[in-house]
Every structure is written in structure tokens, then in C-alpha cells.
Amino acid sequence: MTVGPRFRVGVADSEPEVRRAVRRILHGGADFIKILATGAVLTRGGTPGAPEFTEGEIRAAVEEAALYGTHVAAHAHGAEGIKRSVRAGVRSIEHGSLMDDESIELMRAHGTYLVADIYNGDYIAETGRREGWPADTLRKNDETTEAQREGFHKAVAAGVRIAYGTDSGVYPHGDNARQLPYMVRHGMTPVQAIQAATLVAAQLLGWEDRVGSLEPGRFADLVAVDGHDLGDLSAFREVACVMKGGRVVRPLRVPS
């Protein structure tokens, strides 16, 4: 399939091209920039561990975004792409599947956020095999799933700032809470996992003055779940009550 020009506005292959692409995207109304610092798992022909930008090209994106008061998120699976991105000043690493000890220490030292979708691998393996997804995709998923979870555990122990992100769209929206137990299973306390999805995620977005905590002046976006024991957080898959902007949009049902 050939992708038309209007879908290729972000394609760039040099520092000047990167700067032009960033300006074009931000002029179009984007809130921030996301770059593909490495190949991908679900993209046919992509190599997750292979860098796709030089450190200078990534830094050009970061510098250009900063002129507009915003930041850059880096899709990065491979360790070299992660390290280039962190040194260049990105705000977050998305996925981080093949991170090594050096890249974890760099993220910690630079205060870079890690957004690791550690549930996805199980969904892709199960659904992909059932539905006959390409063998290359399933192979790459197998090669990155456990490596990502091992790296996540190390990142938690090292004190890397971790924000909740699920890459939903790969699996159906509405199942996002499935990742919470995985985060607990791979090194976080239940409270840390909840904070990753609220306070820390708000900090990453630069929205901590609006969401992520229960304080006067915030949006008052809340959910309630049944039970008093946090456990492994699987209860968050069954939300009992939803409040949006201080208004209840799903009332709490009290058993009769």
C-alpha cells in the first residue's frame, strides 16, 4: 500500500528536515511531538532494536519543540535509540523494550519518563496467533515481551520515573486497566502503579495543575472500584463509579 503525501508530513532524514517537520506539525495544532527513534514491533519490515534517527536529529526535534514551549516523546525499543533520545533531551521513552543497564541509568539521571506498555505482549501473542498475524510480527513480539518486563523491573528498582501508558489501540480501548496488575507483578507496589496512572502521568503531560491528584482547583476526574484491599489492582477492570469534572457520570450502585 502506498501512503499519500498528507500522511507523510513527519517524514524527515536530516536535522533541517526534522526541524521543518516539527514546525509543520506544531503549526497544525499538535500539543507535542512524538518521534520514531527506533523501528517497531507491529510495523512490517521494522527492526525494533535499530535506531532510525541520529542523536543530532533527535536533538533538533527537541530544540525546535522547546521553542514552542512543548516537548518530545520518543518511541524507542532498542537500547541505542533510547540512549540517543535521552542524551538529546526527550521527555519520555515509549516502550523501552530492549533497554539495558546503561540506558536505565541514563533515564534515571536525566529524569526521563519511561512509558512501558508491559501488558501488550501477552495480548499480541494470544490474539495474533489466533487471528493469523504475520510471523515476523509475532517473532518480534516474542523477542521483546520478556525483555521489556525485565527492563521495567530494573527501571523501577533504579528509581526511573514511570508513567502509565498502555498503547491501547493495539488492544481495544476500555481494557487499559489490564496493565495495572502487570506493573505490580514486575516490581511496583500497588500504590506506585496507581500513582503512575495518575500523579506521575499528569506530571509527564505537564497537567499536574489540572489532573492527577485530589486538590482544590483540579478537574475532579475520579473513579471508584469495589473493595478495600489494593491487592494486585485487578479490581480496576470493574469501575463502580465515574466522576468527570466533579459531575457523576456513572453512579455508584449500592447492593440492596
Image (spheres, grey):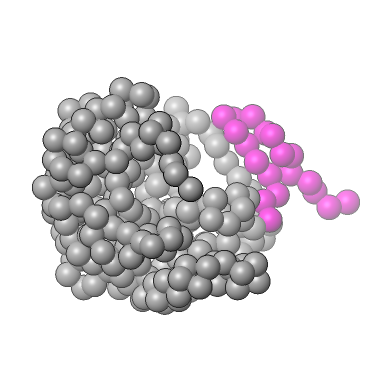
Residue 235 in the figure: left or right of residue 116: right
Residue at horizontal 36%, vertical 30%? 30
User: In this rendering, is residue 100 above or below 63?
Assistant: below
Find residue 131 and report its horizontal and vertical position in percent.
65, 67
Q: Is residue 47 magenta?
A: no
Residue sitting farthest toward the front:
2
Q: Nearer the viewer, residue 156 or 115?
A: 115
Instruction: Determine which quarter of the picture holds residue 196.
Output: bottom left
Q: Nearer the viewer, residue 183 or 227?
A: 183
In the visual, does 162 lie left or right of 62?
right
Q: Is residue 180 left or right of residue 14?
A: right
Span highlighted in magenta in the image: 238-256
Residue lying at the far right in this picture: please name it.
256
Residue 154: percent from left, percent from top: 30, 73
Left or right: where 74 falls relative to 125: left
Q: Is residue 166 visible?
A: yes
Residue 113 visible from this viewpoint: no
Residue 45 versus residue 205 in the image, above or below: below
Query: Which residue is at the front of the view, 207 or 141?
Result: 141
Residue at the image point whose x is 74% and y is 44% from the top: 252
Q: Nearer the viewer, residue 168 or 244?
A: 168
Q: Identify whether 100 is placed above or below 218.
A: below
Considering every residue shown, the one lying at the far left of the view is 56
Q: Give the tally of numbered discs.
A: 0
x, y percentage for residue 45? 38, 62
Which residue shows up at 79% across the image and 46% down it? 253
Picture coordinates of residue 141, whole percent (x, y)? 45, 71
**Which residue does the image show at 36% across and 37% down from the upper left?**
8
